[in-house]
Image (cartoon, rainbow, N blue to C red):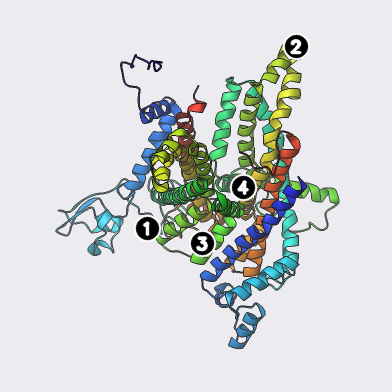
């Protein structure tokens, strides 16, 4: 187990190098000079001398061949000496340090919610297979599964947050939910701790719902399928035959066994969640990693983009590894690191 | 000793072929049948979009000259005229057959900017005064083109790498599967946005860019699936028989193994179509995909962000994406049930 984990962790190094190299080469291939691109950007018309441009290129290694550039970039990533954003000169660590907790909060909340909702739904659907409730649920989950998140988010904005169509029944004067951000723009610092919690919760309702439902739709379907399969197993029949009450059979025997594959799906849902949070953050103006990444790509700010891509890739791989380890931990039949057949 | 007797009775009617069996299984469910019809309907809409909504007539006699299908040919002599001006300047002998909706996907009606749905503009107009119905109709072209083309790309890459990896095994398999892992760990949206932001494609080039870019990051599922199938099939006796008969690697792989591994790929391809359409929508929505002067459903949704009062801009393009993705997913589910005999009850 330990050697397996170590081997997997070691394999991450070439994988990360592959991803960053891919990303770096892509940006290089585009061929446009990022420094020039920044100052030709009509957004901020700044007069800048040729000399200053040369100086900046030197500072960011742009005057060197690509492998030197890449090697320096990797060294910076490896030593976590990430440097500063091109955009505003703030340290990258600081920018990420601000954005990451927001994204983590968002993802964490929606992950927990997805599991909390999908497990009971899946169990209900499987136990009452072919009932009206099961059929309605199956169709509803299928529809949810195909619903584009960016559309739902936009609809939320238009109908629930713009205040133009639905006026909130309890405040009467403005929209049900805020339009942008994850906390109030004004006066957030002066709020009491409880007030802050309330404010953040109120701001996060729509983003979390938008981020949660795809995961929850997928998880419920898996849960139902897994539960159906478990309920057909011999040991469930044995449990019923020896006269255990149905509740014990369902929750004690079947549920516990069908939880295994569901738990391990955490790792596989992670990439989905990251993609989803880019979109959700962009719709609701929540300044997390996704929004920061989009801005960095628009600039374009090479070091920041590559840092974020490498970081998210690392998180994804750790998630997948975690789910594999979890799989082995909860299911003693599985031996990791042994090649099958 | 006598050889065991072969079963004597041939069935009176030859057993239905695999295709017949699968298709009858597929068509048995009403919802799946409907989804297939809707898929065909959307494809027809994309094909004949110029006849449904265009700023030029379908046929026209104008100033003594006869035009056939100016909506397709876009003749130079008519370039300055849209439907409204044509109608104003038509003489007594002139006639025209207009399309269902006399607006093109990129024709600006400056008298009706952000107009709500009306008899003039059935689904309203966007912030540039462009007809939402016309744009939704033409948007089907972009969505289907990106979907179909990127699925072709990803199936090609996936089948090639998956089969080579499984058939030859060893070091090649190890390296290829490592690459699959790398590509799989790539944060899709971020990398796609990076690639598209750098290419900054215009016009139909953006569709090509999008298809390649989506295909390049989404082939891993197909590769894994094909690899698994081939590993299963490789050990079967008929493959051994083919090898004993002296068939080469290429012949065994492409002639004997691949055809038997492909039907599950069809299922994955259908789901991949749905997810490619979703991805195209998301990228265009973020403002990195199809440029604004082309009609794309995701790009239309992007327009809502500055105009949250225009509910028609949010509802209709989004509903189009939703419907398309749903029918492809439904068809995929149906195909899976029809193709996989293990699931058949």
Q: Is residue A24 above or below residue B162?
A: below
Q: Residue at x 38, y 34 (%)?
A: B37
Residue labelled with disc 1? B107
Answer with left or right where residue B282 lies relative to residue A325.
left
Q: Quadrant of the C terminus of chain A?
A: top right
Residue labelled with disc 4? A272
| Quadrant in the rendering for residue B179 | bottom right
> Which chain's residue wears label 2?
A
> Which chain's residue wears label 3?
B
Q: Which mark is residue B196?
A: 3
Residue at disc 2, secondary structure: loop
Which-is-in-front pick, marks 2 and 1? 2
Q: Which mark is residue A243?
A: 2
> Which chain's residue wears label 4?
A
Label 2 crowd (10 A; few <14 / some 14-19 / many >=20):
few
Q: Same subunit under labels 4 and 1?
A: no
Q: CA distance from mark 2 to mark 3?
A: 62 Å
Q: Position of residue A27 (x, y in %)?
A: 56, 68
Q: CA distance from mark 2 to mark 1?
A: 73 Å
Q: Is residue B263 above or below residue A240?
A: below
Asked if labels 1 and 3 touch by Cβ distance under 8 angstroms, the answer is no
| Quadrant in the rendering for residue B255 | top left
N-term mark: 4 or 2: 2
Q: CA distance from mark 4 to mark 2?
A: 43 Å
Answer with left or right where residue A224 lies relative to residue B97.
right
Q: Residue at x 44, y 37 (%)?
A: B239
Residue at disc 4, secondary structure: helix
Label 1 crowd (10 A; few <14 / some 14-19 / many >=20):
some
Which-is-in-front pick, marks 4 and 1? 4
Which-is-in-front pick, marks 4 and 2? 2
Residue at disc 1, secondary structure: loop
């Amino acid at each position: 187990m330990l050697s397996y984990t170590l081997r997997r962790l070691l394999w991450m190094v070439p994988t990360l190098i592959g991803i960053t190299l891919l990303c770096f080469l892509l940006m290089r291939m585009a061929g446009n000079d990022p420094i020039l691109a920044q100052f030709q950007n009509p957004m901020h018309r700044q007069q800048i001398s040729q000399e200053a441009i040369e100086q900046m290129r030197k500072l960011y290694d742009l005057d060197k061949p690509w492998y030197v550039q890449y090697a320096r970039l990797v060294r910076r990533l490896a030593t976590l000496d990430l440097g500063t954003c091109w955009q505003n000169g703030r340290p990258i660590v600081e920018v990420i340090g601000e954005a990451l907790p927001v994204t983590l909060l968002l993802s964490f909340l929606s992950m927990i919610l997805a599991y909390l909702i999908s497990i009971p739904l899946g169990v209900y659907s499987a136990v009452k297979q072919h009932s009206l409730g099961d059929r309605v649920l199956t169709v509803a989950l299928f529809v949810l599964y195909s619903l584009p998140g960016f559309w739902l988010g936009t609809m939320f904005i238009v109908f629930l947050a713009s205040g133009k169509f639905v006026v909130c029944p309890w405040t009467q004067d403005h929209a049900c939910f805020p339009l942008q951000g994850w906390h109030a723009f004004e006066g957030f610092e002066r709020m009491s701790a409880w007030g802050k919690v309330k404010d953040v919760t109120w701001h996060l309702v729509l983003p979390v719902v938008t981020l949660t439902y795809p995961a929850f739709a997928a998880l419920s379907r898996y849960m139902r399928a897994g539960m159906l399969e478990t309920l057909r197993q011999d040991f469930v029949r044995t449990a019923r035959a020896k006269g255990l009450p149905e509740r014990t059979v369902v929750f004690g025997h079947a549920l516990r066994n069908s939880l295994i594959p569901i738990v391990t799906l955490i790792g596989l849902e992670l990439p989905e969640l990251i993609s989803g949070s880019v979109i959700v953050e962009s719709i609701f103006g929540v300044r997390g990693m996704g929004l920061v990444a989009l801005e960095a790509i628009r600039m374009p700010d090479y070091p920041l983009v590559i840092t974020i891509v490498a970081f998210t890739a690392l998180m994804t791989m750790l998630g997948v590894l975690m789910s594999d380890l979890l799989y082995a931990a909860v299911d003693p039949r599985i031996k990791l690191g042994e090649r099958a057949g | 000793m006598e050889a065991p007797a072969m079963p004597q009775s041939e069935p009176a009617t030859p057993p239905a072929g695999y295709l017949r069996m699968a298709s009858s299984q597929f068509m048995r469910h009403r919802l799946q049948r409907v989804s297939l019809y809707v898929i065909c309907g959307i494809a027809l809409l994309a094909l004949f979009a110029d006849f449904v909504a265009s700023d030029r007539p379908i046929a026209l006699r104008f100033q003594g000259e006869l035009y056939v299908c100016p909506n397709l040919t876009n003749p130079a002599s008519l370039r300055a005229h849209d439907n409204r001006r044509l109608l104003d300047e038509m003489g007594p002998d002139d006639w025209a057959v207009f399309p269902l909706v006399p607006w093109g996907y990129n024709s600006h009606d400056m008298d009706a900017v952000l107009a709500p749905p009306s008899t003039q503009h059935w689904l309203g107009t966007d912030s540039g005064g462009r007809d939402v119905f016309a744009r939704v109709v033409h948007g089907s072209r972009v969505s289907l083109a990106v979907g179909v083309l990127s699925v072709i790309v990803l199936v090609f890459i996936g089948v090639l790498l998956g089969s080579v990896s499984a058939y030859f095994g060893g070091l090649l398999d190890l390296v290829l599967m490592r690459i699959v892992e790398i590509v799989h760990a790539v944060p899709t949206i971020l990398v796609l946005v990076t690639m598209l932001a750098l290419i900054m494609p215009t016009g139909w080039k953006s569709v090509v860019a999008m298809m390649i870019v989506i295909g390049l990051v989404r082939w891993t599922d197909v590769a894994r699936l094909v690899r698994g199938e081939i590993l299963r099939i490789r050990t079967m006796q008929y493959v051994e028989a083919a090898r004993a008969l002296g068939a080469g690697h290429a012949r065994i792989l492409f002639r004997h193994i691949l055809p038997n591994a492909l039907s599950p790929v069809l299922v994955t391809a259908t789901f991949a179509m749905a997810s490619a359409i979703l991805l195209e929508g998301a990228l265009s929505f973020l403002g990195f995909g199809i440029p604004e002067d082309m009609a794309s459903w995701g790009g239309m949704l992007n327009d809502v962000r500055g105009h949250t009062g225009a509910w028609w801009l949010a509802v209709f393009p989004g509903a189009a994406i939703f419907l398309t993705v749903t029918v492809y997913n439904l068809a995929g589910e149906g195909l899976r049930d029809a193709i996989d005999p293990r699931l058949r009850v």
